[in-house]
Image (cartoon, helix red, strand yellow):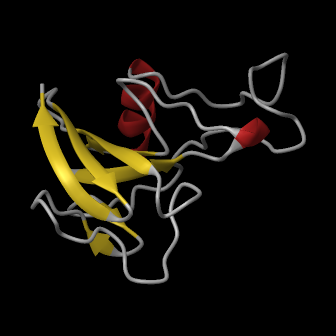
Amino acid sequence: MAWYEYSQNNSGGSFVRNDSVGPYVWIEASSSKDANNRAEEVGIYFDGAYDDGPDCPCCGDRWYEQYRDDGTDKPELYGQVLTRRKGSRIVKDGSYYAGSRNDDLVLHLYHKNGTHERIFTKAGKVTGHSRD
């Protein structure tokens, strides 16, 4: 079992943010194909810039499929394992994520057992955590 990251391209100048997805989503799966199938089940789509899709043709697709079975053992962002401890930094100083470092950000993790976990952040620090 491995974790596959789906980082959202800012297609058309905005991110899709809702209860299921945000700029960063991780899927725990047995293969890249399994991860892509599960990603589509939670609202991630591929080829959105073509065939009258919702994404900007100039900016490109919002999400890209995983093609290699080389996920990580744990969910990582910029090579750092994500933490759920309140106040912990999720990125190194000087790193950028999802636009501004002052953005409120929800990181979505989908476990193989069906659990949807959210890590809430502000300015690169964990502010909360939930599961359903």
As drawn, 47 above or below 5: above
Instruction: Give the residue drawn at x 74%, y 41%.
Output: 13
Q: Which residue is located at x 16 percent, y 66 percent?
A: 87
Quarter of the rendering containing residue 100: bottom right
Quadrant that contains the C terminus: top left
Q: Is residue 62 left or right of residue 70?
A: right
Q: Would residue 13 appear left or right of 80 to someone viewing this image?
A: right
**Residue 20 occupies which quadrant of the picture?**
top left
Near-viewer residue (102 or 115): 102
Query: Is residue 26 among what the camera can see?
Result: no
The x and y percentages for residue 89 are 26, 71
Image position, residue 110 (x, y; %): 25, 36
Q: Is residue 128 above or below residue 92?
A: above
| Residue under the point 42% across and 72% down | 78
Please tell me which residue is depicted at 43% across the width and 25% down the height of the picture: 18
- Spot the residue most to the right: 58
Task: Measuring from the top left, give residue 117's x and y in whole percent.
Answer: 19, 37
Furthest-bottom residue in view? 93
Would residue 104 appear left or right of 23 to someone viewing this image?
left
| In the image: residue 23, left or right of residue 52 | left
